[in-house]
Amino acid sequence: MRRAALDAAVGVPARDAARTAPKIRSRAAQMRRTAWFFVAPAALFFLILIAFPLLSVLWRSLQFASLTNPTVAGFAGLENYRTILDDDQFWPALRNTSIWTGVSVAGEYALGLLSAVALAQPIRGRAIFRGVIIIPWVIPIVVAGLDWTWMLTPDYGVINLWLVKLGVLDKPHFWLGDMGTALFTVTFVNIWRSFPFYTISLLAALQAVPPELHEAAAIDGAGPIRRFFAITMPHLKTVSFTLIFIHVIWTAINFDFIWVMTEGGPLNASLTLPIMIYRYAMQDYDIGAACALASMSMGFMATAFFVYYYGVMRRSKGGAR
């Protein structure tokens, strides 16, 4: 009797669970369908605007595709890549791209950090300065490049005028026409335009640092410099890594600034990989070589990403734990 009653008592929840299980599975399936419904637009966007062009470039890099000689067509294998590596301009362009990217990102971060720390202080007119400092970032690249080109001209440029008046220069200097200064001049202008983005991002991170930590450290006798490196910088680590990585990519693939100001000259002194890709495609009409160089540039960026992620981010997360 007791066993029958026990079996009956156990059987009721079992029957309820058996009835509920299909409903749970149906609800889970509905949630999965809903999730795919929301993911589908982003996936379609990725396939049409990113994946398809990317695969198309990779495929064309393995083809003979010259608009000036359409009779030469078909599968080229690695011939286009060999053409790039044999080009005398490739290695100088790669070196210039590295200098342009490294100096730009380092200068932008340093200037952005200094200005962010300054704007975080309780100074009069801070709101005005925060609004003014963003102006270079919102100026279109073409407009900024043309303005600086005019200001740097040796004949009527205001920068040369004041440098001569102040005694810094004996005579006007052709900053963009000198092989020794062209690349660094364009890099300086790029730093001027891009550092406000760092400033705003780092300023937001600075305001998230708990003031109690600084107060406690000051009571313990830590000076401003020690508090900055021991408290502030660790809180800026994540946003700093993100900013640097994004701007390395943006700067390495930047075409507009250098093309507007120097077009890669003089005598290829400021030639970078994006300028070289443009010349292959739009001047030499060698689409295969242009796609090969673009694929190589993409490989450089992918390598930088993996080095960044596994060498910096994972180590940073491990240290945080």
Image: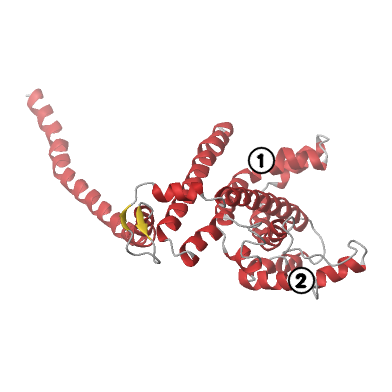
On the image, the x and y values in percent for residue 172 come to 84, 67
Q: How far apart are marks 2 and 1 (CA)?
A: 43 Å
Kind of residue indicated by mark 1: Pro
The label number, if any, that marks residue 153 in the structure image: 2
Q: On the rendered structure, is 285 left or right of 252? A: left
In-front residue for pair 222/276: 276
| Residue 268 coordinates in the image, percent (x, y) | 63, 58
Q: What residue type is labelled 2?
A: Thr
**On the picture, is 183 further left or further right than 283?**
right
Q: Mark 2 or mark 1: name the one nearer the start of the chain.
A: 2
Placement of the N terminus among the 4 image quadrants: top left
Which of 115/212 is in front?
Answer: 115
- Residue placed under numbered mark 1 in the picture: 234
Q: Which residue lies furthest to the bottom in this view?
A: 156
In terms of image quadrants, where is residue 321? top right
In this view of the protein, which residue sits in the foreground, 309 or 53?
A: 53
Q: Which residue is drawn at 43% across and 52% down?
A: 292
In percent of width and height, residue 281 lies at 46, 63
